[in-house]
Amino acid sequence: MMKYWTIRARIVGSFAVVVALVLVMGIVAYTRLENGQKRDRPVQRHRPWAKYSSDLQTLIWENYALTQRTPCRRKSRDGEVGGAAQKQPVTRG
């Protein structure tokens, strides 16, 4: 049957099949996500510590990110602040 289709019809048909598959996958994913959220609601309602634990973990990650972004300000061996001592320029003479 597809043997008599033009190239244009084959391309349009293939595109339609891909779009249909994407829509089906989206619908399946959405329904599974909804079912998961419905199952988790009783846990969220009866376990308030779960929210506090999640909030604490978020704060820990934010603090970690800040420590990685802020440079360490400590004294080096020669007393300068900011890490390693500055190298002396090389003079050629």
Image (cartoon, helix red, strand yellow):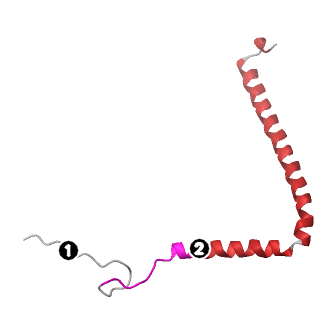
Is residue 37 highlighted in magenta? no
Q: The C terminus lies in which quarter of the figure? A: bottom left
- Secondary structure state at the residue bearing disc 1: loop
Left-right relation of 76 to 37: left
Q: Whole-percent x and y of residue 88?
A: 21, 76
The foreground one among 4 and 61 is: 61
Crowding at dot 2, Cα within 10 Å, few <14 / some 14-19 / many 20+, comes out as few
Q: Quadrant of residue 37?
A: bottom right
Q: Residue 64 carries which label?
A: 2
Q: How far apart are marks 1 and 2 (CA)?
A: 36 Å
- Name the element at disc 2: helix
Magenta span covers which residues? 64-77
* Left or right relative to 47: residue 11: left
Q: Position of residue 46 (x, y in %)?
A: 91, 71
Residue under the point 78% across and 26% down: 13
- Residue 78 is situated, as x and y percent measured from the top left of the image, at 29, 85
User: Residue 29 appears at what percent x and percent y?
Assistant: 83, 47
Answer with left or right where residue 75 lies relative to residue 1.
Answer: left
In the displayed structure, 12 sits above or below 43; it is above
| Pointer 1 residue | 89
Question: Disc 1 or 2, which lies upstream in sequence?
Answer: 2
| Location of residue 63 by image quarter | bottom right
Q: Residue at x 58, y 72 (%)?
A: 65
User: Tag 2: residue type?
Assistant: Tyr
Task: Examine the rendered structure and indicate whether residue 56 appears above or below residue 1.
Answer: below
Q: Where 13 falls versus 19 (above or below)?
A: above
Look at label 1 and name its amino acid: Pro
Quadrant including the N terminus: top right
